[in-house]
Amino acid sequence: MVNELLKKLSNAHGVSGSEGSVFSLIKKELKGSVDEIREDAMGNLIAIKRGNKFKVMLAAHMDEIGLMVKYIDEKGFLRFVALGGWYGPTLYNQRVILHGSKGPCMGVIGGKPPHMMDEDERKKGVKVDEMFIDVGAQNKGDVEELGIDIGTPVTIDREFATLANHRVTGKAFDNRAGVAMLIKTLKEVKTPLTIYGVFTVQEEVGLKGARTSAYALDPDCAIATDVTIPGDHPGIEMKDAAVEMGKGPVITIVDASGRGLIANRNVVRWLGKAAEEHSIPVQVEVGSGGTTDATAIHLTKAGIPSTTLSIPSRYIHSPVEVLDVRDIEAGVALLVAALKTKPAL
C-alpha cells in the first residue's frame, strides 16, 4: 500500500546532509527487489536493476528541509540555521526533534511573544534569526548532557495523517512522495533496460547528490521524481500553477521559467505516449517555481536527456503538506509502463 510506505517515509527524519535514517529505511524496503544496492561517497543510495546497455537514471531526493544548531547560550537556549527553503512564520512556535549523540530530544521553537510586540513588529513577523529552540534546559551544561552540540540536526515533530478523498497530510512529502514512487517502481518494473534508482542527498541545499551521482553513472536519460505546486486551492490561481491534485502525476516541460530545466522533448513524448497507451491520467507543466534534481542531472558531462515526473502537493516546505495518493499510484504505473521500452533519443 502506498499509504503505509509514504507514512513510514514521511515520519522518518533526514535533513540535508543527515539522511542516514531514511537511507536505512529505503534499503530495507528494496531488499530482494534489485540486483545491487550501494552507497557512494556523497551518501547517495544507488539501487541497480541490470539489463541491456541502455541506462535510465531515476532520481528521488531523500533529504527534507530542516534546521541545524549553530550556537548554545549560557541559559541553554539554542540558535539555529535553516537548511533549505523555510518561510519564517511557518517555523515560529513549532515543536521540533533534535537528533543528538544520545538520541532524539524534544524542543520547541520560541521567539518574542506577540503580546510584547509593537504594531510594526507584529506586521513584520518573527524572522528566523530571531527565533531559538527551547529544550527545557536551565543552562548550557544541561544541553550538553542531552547530547546536543553545535551541528546537531533538527527536524519538525509532525506525523502523517489521513484526510478525506484519498488525501493525506504530513511533513517532508517533498520529497518522500518521490521516494515512495521510486521504491514502488523499482519493486514492480520489468524492463529490458538497466535502471539506476538513485535516492539522492542534499537536493534542498543545491542539488548536490544528483550532480555527483549523475556524473559517475553517466546514464542515457533520466527522470527525477519529486513534487510540484498545484493551483487548486485559495491563494493561488490555475494560471500560475496549472495542475491539480487527483488528476495524475505531472510531466515537466519547463521549470523555474527555463532557468532550471528545459526538458528533453523526446523523454517527455516517451512518458506521454506510455500514459496514452495505458490510459494513465497525466498532466504537463510549464512552471515558474523551483527546480529539481533533473536540473543538475541534465547539465552533467555532455548533457543527459531528462525530465521530472512530479506529484501535485499543497503547502510544500511546511509540516502539513497534502497530496492525493492516487497520483503516486498513477506515477508508478506510468514509469512501469514507459520502462518497457526506451525513448527515441
Image (spheres, rainbow, N blue to C red):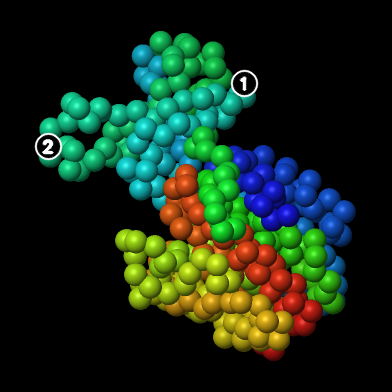
Residue 236, percent from left and from top: 34, 65
Residue projecting furthest to the left: 119
**Callout 2 amino acid:** Glu
Q: Which residue is mark 2?
A: 119
The image shows residue 86 at horizontal and vertical percentages of: 39, 47
Q: Quadrant of the C terminus?
A: bottom right
The x and y percentages for residue 207 are 53, 58
| Number of the label disc, if any, that sits on residue 102 | 1
Q: Is residue 326 left or right of residue 253?
A: right
Residue 230 horizontal/vertical position (percent): 45, 66
Quarter where residue 34 is shown? bottom right
- The image quarter containing residue 177 is bottom right
Label 1 amino acid? Lys
Q: Kindly report which numbered mark, 1 or 2, lies closer to the viewer in this rendering.
A: 2
For the N terminus, the quadrant is bottom right
Q: Which residue is depicted at the point 58% across and 44% down?
A: 160
Q: Residue furthest front?
A: 164
To which quarter of the image does residue 225 belong? bottom right
Compared to residue 200, the image places residue 340 above or below, namely below
- Between residue 289 and residue 237, name the one nearer to us: 237
284 left or right of 47?
Answer: left
- Residue at 48% x, 17% y is 143
Q: Looking at this view, is 263 or 71 the one in front?
A: 263
First in sequence, mark 1 or 2: give its number. Answer: 1
Question: In this figure, what is the number of numbered marks?
Answer: 2
Question: What's the residue at 56%, 39% (across, down)?
Answer: 159
Q: Is residue 323 visible?
A: yes
| 155 relative position to 36: left or right | left
Residue 84 visible in the current orientation: no
Disc 2 is placed on an element classified as helix
For mark 1, does the 10 Å Cα neighbourhood hold few (<14), some (14 to 19), or many (20 or more) residues?
A: few
